[in-house]
Image (cartoon, rainbow, N blue to C red):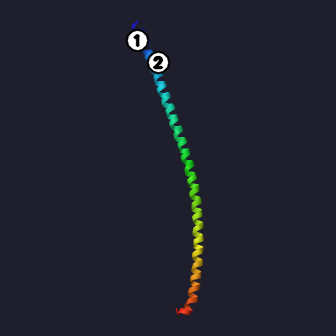
Amino acid sequence: MNDNIYTVLMTAITVLGSAAAFRFYEKKSMRKERDEEFIRHDCKDRIAKLEALLVESSREKDELRKMVLELTREVASLRTKVEFFERGAAPRTGL
């Protein structure tokens, strides 16, 4: 009779322990899935922001490149004018 009681107690402890372990691992798995989903969503948001910044910086770079080209043209034009005035002023000043 004692063997039967021990067997029943061991079975009950095993079943209760298994159910508790199952709930523990189930909650742990759900928490891990939520964390992974949060990380995935956060990464998507960050990637979208970085892509927007990349497009904006590319646009700014193109605008700055255009400004540099325009300033280069203006410098060349002014250089030509200075050379013209220096040539014109040289005979008058004796340089």
Provide residue 48's location: percent of width, then percent of height.
57, 48
Provide residue 41's location: percent of width, then percent of height.
55, 41
Of the two numbered discs 2 and 1 on the same chain, state the one appearing first in sequence. 1
Q: Quadrant of residue 81?
A: bottom right
Mark 2, secondary structure of its residue: helix
Q: Quadrant of residue 37?
A: top right
Q: Residue at x 51, y 31 (%)?
A: 30
Q: Residue at x 45, y 18 (%)?
A: 16
Disc 2 + disc 1, Cβ < 8 Å: no
| Front-most of residues 68 and 88 | 88
Q: Is residue 32 above or below residue 84?
A: above
Q: Amino acid at mark 1?
A: Tyr
Mark 1, secondary structure of its residue: helix
Residue 16 lies left or right of residue 72; in this view the side is: left
Q: Amino acid at mark 2?
A: Val
Q: Residue at x 57, y 76 (%)?
A: 75
Q: Is residue 70 above or below residue 50?
A: below
Provide residue 25's location: percent of width, then percent of height.
48, 28
Q: Is residue 38 above or below residue 1?
A: below
- Badge count: 2
Q: Is residue 67 above or below residue 27?
A: below
Residue that label 2 marks: 15
Residue that label 1 marks: 6
Q: Quadrant of residue 11?
A: top left
Q: CA distance from mark 2 to mark 1?
A: 14 Å
Structural crowding at the residue carrying mark 1, measured as other residues with C-alpha within 10 Å and reported as few (<14), some (14–19) or many (≥20) = few
Q: Residue furthest top?
A: 1
Q: Residue furthest left?
A: 2
Quadrant where the image shows the N terminus: top left
